[in-house]
């Protein structure tokens, strides 16, 4: 990942205005008029390097829609300090993050609020080579799962296998050497891994041409909960102090994702312009796949469900993965989305 390259000082505008205190009345009037149209600087931190989960953001930037909304948006890639930490400490305005990170952070005292989900439902899967015969969760018995060694994935695998009548203790957890799943699978380092369909499944299946099989989490919501990954968050302090900027950013970002759903090629082009090092074939295929997954319809992009948040929070707590009360009802809001969301 690329380190953080710029953080806009949030006090910069105040410093500039303070420097005008000795100007004449006419100059002061002109400065006030200029300040009235000066764009509001906004920083948004990605959760990873640029990819199609961020297409709506980059499409809105490419079309100048943030400028039209009076915003000067700077996009940062994550470094040693996460976007959630930067937002909670007031050093950034918005961040891409995930529900399994936001809830524990809130329980620990972080001032984070989700203002939109990027994808309506979880699009994770367990991916394997078809030749390994993993057609259903209980087929993981006796297989090696490539693990990040997190409590969440252990709970997910155990729940899926047990729900399908299998024995979770018979699944071998093998630490991942890298996140290059193609190498891990083809060199027999493991038999299955947790991936995101829009990127890894598309890359391995459509681009690399491997014969793969997936167990999509969304097909097993009777066994595990749905949850939002990724989502866009800000702080409660920002919502309270500057709701107009929050609304402008969220509404414009929603416009970007609505456009990405309607024209995935334009979304792919905008992302490639911003990150030309990416594989165009993968980006275009991924953008096309996500166009139907971001939301049920363009007008409902970003909408979150209280039931989804509550059920996931309860599941984390019951599994010993949530220490403290995250205040789940205050962890999310739809109020800044356009329309009647």
Image (cartoon, grey):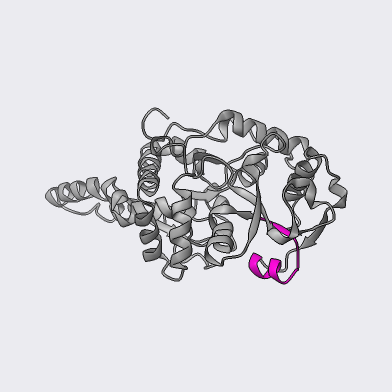
Looking at the image, the residue that sits furthest to the left is 26
Decide: is 141 above or below 4.
above
Residue 311: where, in percent of width, then height? 66, 32
- Left or right: 335 with respect to 174? left
Determine which quarter of the picture holds residue 187. Answer: bottom right
104 part of magenta stretch: no
Horizontal side of 106 relative to 172 (left or right) equals left
**In front of the other: 31 or 6:** 6
Q: Quadrant of the N terminus?
A: bottom right
Against 327, is 256 above or below?
below
- Residue at 54% x, 35% y is 332
Q: Is residue 192 magenta?
A: yes
Give the residues drawn in magenta, as a range: 181-194
User: Can you give x and y, in whole percent of width and height, for residue 87 in the image?
Assistant: 52, 49
- Residue 129 placed where, x, y %? 69, 61
Task: In this rendered view, identify the residue nearer to me: 218 or 309.
Answer: 218
Q: Is residue 147 visible?
A: no
State whether residue 117 appears in this view. yes
């Amino acid at each position: 990942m690329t380190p953080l390259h710029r953080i806009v000082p949030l006090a910069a505008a105040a410093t500039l205005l303070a420097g005008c205190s000795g100007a004449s009345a006419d100059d002061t009037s002109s400065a006030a008029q200029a300040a009235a149209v000066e764009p509001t600087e906004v920083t948004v931190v990605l959760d990873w390097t640029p990819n199609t989960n961020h297409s709506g953001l980059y499409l809105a930037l490419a079309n100048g829609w943030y400028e039209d909304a009076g915003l000067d948006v700077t996009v940062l890639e994550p470094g040693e300090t996460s976007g959630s930490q930067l937002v909670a400490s007031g050093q950034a305005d918005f961040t891409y993050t995930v529900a399994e990170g936001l809830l524990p952070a809130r329980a620990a005292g972080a001032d984070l609020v989700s203002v939109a989900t990027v994808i309506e439902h979880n699009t994770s899967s367990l991916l394997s080579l078809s030749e390994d015969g993993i057609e259903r969760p209980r087929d993981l018995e006796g297989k090696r799962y490539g693990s990040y060694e997190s409590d969440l994935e252990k709970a997910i695998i155990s729940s899926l296998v047990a729900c399908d009548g299998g024995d979770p203790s018979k699944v071998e957890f093998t630490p991942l050497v890298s996140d290059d799943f193609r190498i891990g699978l083809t060199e027999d380092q493991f038999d299955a891994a947790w991936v995101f369909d829009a990127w890894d499944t598309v890359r391995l299946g459509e681009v690399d041409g491997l014969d793969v099989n997936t167990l999509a989490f969304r097909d097993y919501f009777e066994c595990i909960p749905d949850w939002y990954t990724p989502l866009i968050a800000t702080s409660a302090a920002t919502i309270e102090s500057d709701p107009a900027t929050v609304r402008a950013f969220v509404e414009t970002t929603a416009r970007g994702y609505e456009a990405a759903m309607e024209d995935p090629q334009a979304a792919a082009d905008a992302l490639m312009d911003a990150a030309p090092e990416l594989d165009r074939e993968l980006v275009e295929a991924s953008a096309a796949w996500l166009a139907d997954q971001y939301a049920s319809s363009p007008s409902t992009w970003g909408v979150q469900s209280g039931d989804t948040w509550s059920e996931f929070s309860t599941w984390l707590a019951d599994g010993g993965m949530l220490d403290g009360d995250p205040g789940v009802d205050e962890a999310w809001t739809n109020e800044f989305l356009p329309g009647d969301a």
